[in-house]
Amino acid sequence: MFTGIITDIGTIERVEQRGDLRVRVATAYDTATVDLGASIACSGVCLTVIDKGPGWFTVDVSGETASRTAHGQWSEGRQLNLERAMKLGDELGGHIVTGHVDGVAEVAAVEAVGDSRVVTFRLPGDLAPFVAAKGSVTVDGVSLTVNTVADGAGGTTFAVNLIPHTQAVTTLGALAVGQAVNIEIDVLARYLQRMQSLAGQR
């Protein structure tokens, strides 16, 4: 379980194609405090640490995970938003994040507004019902508040505001139009949809 509050930006140092992708990530974390088998969210994807050393850790990325996450994410030199799993008693500064990506969205627009940037994303149609204005959404592992949602002939878009701090401590400050990002909807929305679908069968 995570909160969507990023604590490091890692860089993929090496990718090996085995049965799955084996990915080595450079990090500023003190890896002596990271157990083998621990979970680390990598741009919103919960992955298991299988090896580590000073300043790096290694994870396996399955074909299923690679197929459901942003194109090009698992390539050498790519930066990743990192978050270690929360511990009991940790401050819940963002919202409850599972590290399970629900879909991939595309950056539709980026606009400077004062010192902030307003970024608009185009959603896959199946995720549109789960994103609401002033609700929470996770973009590449970052907990954000949805400013606006617009439904139109071209599909559904939503916009978020990135303050300077968020731009500086995550990879979102470098987002550009056309870029793909991992989306996780609010877990509460997921359960509400499930309950409504079951209620409709009775």
Image (cartoon, rainbow, N blue to C red):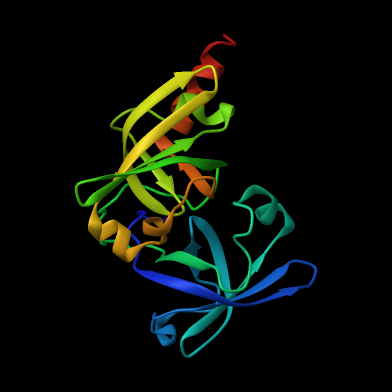
127 or 123, nearer to the observer? 123
Q: Could you say where residue 29 lies in the image, as x and y percent from the top left?
A: 39, 80
Q: Residue at x 32, y 65 (%)?
A: 169
Q: Could you say where residue 11 lies in the image, as x and y percent from the top left?
A: 50, 74
105 or 120, nearer to the observer? 120
Q: In the figure, is residue 67 to the left or right of 86? A: right
**Which residue is farthest left?**
114
State which quarter of the image contains the C terminus.
top right
Q: Residue at x 33, y 40 (%)?
A: 160
Q: Residue at x 40, y 32 (%)?
A: 158
**Which residue is farthest bottom?**
54
Q: In the figure, is residue 110 to the left or right of 18? A: left
State which quarter of the image contains the N terminus.
bottom left
In the picture shown, does residue 187 fall above or below 55?
Answer: above
Q: Residue at x 59, y 11 (%)?
A: 201
In the picture shown, does residue 28 fall above or below 8?
Answer: below
Asked whether the viewer can see residue 91, the reply is: no
Q: In the figure, is residue 199 to the left or right of 142? A: right
Picture quadrant where residue 165 is located: bottom left
In the picture shown, does residue 135 fall above or below 110?
Answer: above
Asked whether the viewer can see residue 109, the reply is: yes
Q: Could you say where residue 143 lies in the image, as x and y percent from the top left?
A: 35, 49
Q: Could you say where residue 139 lies in the image, as x and y percent from the top left?
A: 44, 48
Picture mark count = 0
